[in-house]
Structure formats: structure tokens, C-alpha cells
Image (tube, helix red, strand yellow):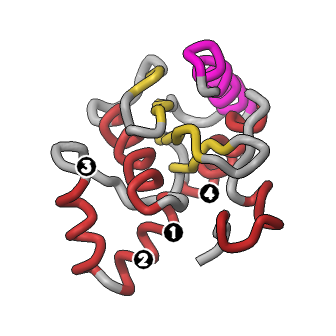
Amino acid sequence: MLTLQKSNVIAEAILKKGREMKLRPLCVVVTDIGARIKTAQREDGCSQARVEMALGKAVASLALGRSSAFVRERQKQGPEFVAQVQNFVGEQKMFMVGGGELIRDEAGNILGAVGVTGATEDEDELLVAHGIRAAGFKTDQDLAHLGAMVRSKA
């Protein structure tokens, strides 16, 4: 179960790792499976739209059941499809760049998503996976052995 306590563990682990890596100020948003914010943490010095960007990465992941980086690739292949998905998520906006990942339990069930922004896409993706694992949850990559249920690659 994705509790507030576990959500905070994810966010704190990401921020701590970012400081260890000497990255620019980060923003982390953890959502439940309905893309409702469980916790949002924005380090001092973050630019104005970071919360919305991090939330958009989590929304993109939940909307298509894949990482936000995959959603970006899907958008390149079929922009009309992704535009229609955006209509379905309503007022929430998808931000289709790396740094958004699903939070899964051991069985592969989706519990929510995390969005991280502030560093490079590769660093954001590394951080989001670190935070998910720090709280005892799994990423798509961790569960790739489950096959079609968890599609960790495009």
C-alpha cells in the first residue's frame, strides 16, 4: 500500500541522493494510482513550474501504464493517440520526458507514480528508480520478468 509515510520515504530518498550527486535543486511528486498527490517536495531554488512538471511526468506514466520517457517515444510514433489520451486525463497535463515512473508492488500491481524534475532526464530517471526502491517498492525494470504485464521497454 502506498501510504503517506512511504510516499515521504520515496521523496526524501530522491532528494538525499540528488544532494549526494550535487545536482541542481529538485522537485519530487508522488501520486496515488488516481494521480492525486500524496506528497510533493520542492527544494529551495527550484524554478517556478517544477511541481507541475513533476506531476505531469507522474500523470503521463499513469495514463499509459509506462514510464514518462516511453510516453514521449509513443508520442513521436503516434501524436494523435497521445493527444486523445491527454483529453482523457482531463485538467491534469502529461509531461512527456524522462523522470516519471510507476510504483509497483512485488506482484506488479500499480500503486501510484513518481515524477522527478530538476536534473537531466537520465539523472531524473536514476533518481526516481532509487526512491521507489528505497521505499521497498518495484519499478518496471525490476519486474521485467513478468512479461507483458510489465512492459519495461518500448
Amino acid found under the numbered disc labelled 3: Lys
Q: Is residue 110 left or right of residue 89?
A: right
Splitting the image into 4 quarters, where does residue 133 fall?
top right
Amino acid found under the numbered disc labelled 1: Phe
Residue 93: image tag: 3
Q: Residue furthest right?
A: 145
Q: Is residue 119 magenta?
A: no
Residue at (42, 49) in percent of width and height? 57
Q: Is residue 34 left or right of residue 132?
A: left
Residue at (47, 39) in percent of width and height? 33
User: What residue sits right under mark 1 in the picture?
Assistant: 70
Residue 132: image tag: none
Query: Residue 3 location, x and y as percent?
Result: 59, 19
Label 2 or label 4, whichever comes before in sequence order:
2
Query: Residue 17 location, x and y as percent?
Result: 72, 30
Cβ atoms under marks 2 and 1 closer than 8 Å: yes
Q: Secondary structure at mark 2?
A: helix
Q: Secondary structure at mark 4?
A: helix
As measured in the structure, the alpha-carbon distance from the residue carrying label 2 to the one carrying label 4 is 18 Å
Report crowding for label 1: few under 14, some 14 to 19, many 20 or more residues within 10 A (C-alpha).
many
Label 2 or label 3, whichever comes before in sequence order:
2
Residue 74: image tag: 2
Q: Nearer the viewer, residue 40 or 135?
A: 135
Residue 122: image tag: 4
Amino acid found under the numbered disc labelled 4: Asp
Magenta span covers which residues?
3-20
Which of the two marks, 4 or 1, is nearer to us in this view? 1
